[in-house]
Image: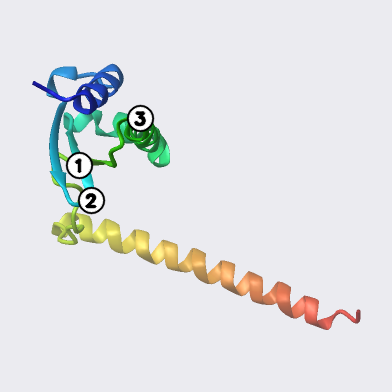
């Protein structure tokens, strides 16, 4: 039997996601309070988190309100089923190395031109008698 807090989170999240059958909430109790671990399908992770974490923060706020009513402290942990982005893979194939080198050279030239233009503008400002 799922507790009221599990049912609450499941109801909210299942209303948001495209694959409600993949929603799982695991409840554990420790010295810090009640930990709810939420797992959703990888394609629904963005919907649950929202822009800049706004949706996740809203769910946590609702849990805080429920905790006030039930005299409990709730923590929501959203589990990334794919394990997260992790460290970037910097290995490239030799075909893409040439493209990457060209892009890097172009970016460096653009950066150098912006720097030289800014320096010129600053030197022009120094010449002004204010």
The residue labelled by disc 2 is 32
Tell me what residue is drawn at x 36 percent, y 64 percent: 104
Above/below status of 9 relative to 15: below
Q: At numbered mark 1, what does the secondary structure look like: helix, strand or loop? A: strand
Above/below status of 6 relative to 71: above
The residue labelled by disc 1 is 35
Label 3 to label 2, Cα distance in Å? 17 Å
User: Is residue 102 toward the left or the right of residue 98 in the image?
Assistant: right
Nearest the eye: 116 or 68: 68
Label 1 to label 3, Cα distance in Å? 17 Å
Instruction: State which tag comes first along the sequence, 3 or 2.
Output: 2
- Image coords of residue 17 (percent x, y): 26, 21
- Image coords of residue 38 (percent x, y): 19, 34
Tell me what residue is drawn at x 35 percent, y 30 percent: 69
Q: Residues within 10 Å of mark 2 (few under 14, many from 20)?
A: few
Circles 1 and 2: CB distance less than 8 Å? yes
Tell me what residue is drawn at x 22 percent, y 23 percent: 4
Above/below status of 13 relative to 104: above
Tell me what residue is drawn at x 19 percent, y 61 percent: 90
Q: In front of the other: label 3 or label 2?
A: 3
Which corner quadrant of the image does residue 21 belong to? top left
Q: Residues within 10 Å of mark 3 (few under 14, many from 20)?
A: few
Q: Identify the image quadrant of the N terminus.
A: top left
Circles 3 and 2: CB distance less than 8 Å? no
The residue labelled by disc 3 is 69
Q: In front of the other: label 1 or label 3?
A: 3
Nearest the eye: 33 or 50: 33
């Amino acid at each position: 039997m799922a507790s009221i807090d599990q049912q609450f989170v499941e109801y909210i999240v299942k209303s948001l996601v495209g694959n409600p059958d993949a929603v799982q909430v695991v409840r554990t109790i420790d010295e810090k309070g009640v930990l709810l671990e939420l797992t959703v399908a990888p394609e629904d992770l963005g919907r649950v988190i929202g822009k800049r974490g706004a949706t996740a923060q809203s769910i946590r706020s609702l849990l805080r309100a429920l905790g006030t009513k039930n005299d409990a402290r709730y923590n929501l942990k959203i589990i990334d089923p794919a394990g997260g982005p992790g460290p970037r893979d910097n290995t490239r194939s030799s075909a893409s190395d040439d493209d990457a080198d060209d892009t890097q050279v172009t970016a460096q030239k653009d950066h150098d031109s912006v720097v030289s233009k800014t320096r010129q503008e600053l030197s022009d400002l120094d010449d002004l008698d204010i």
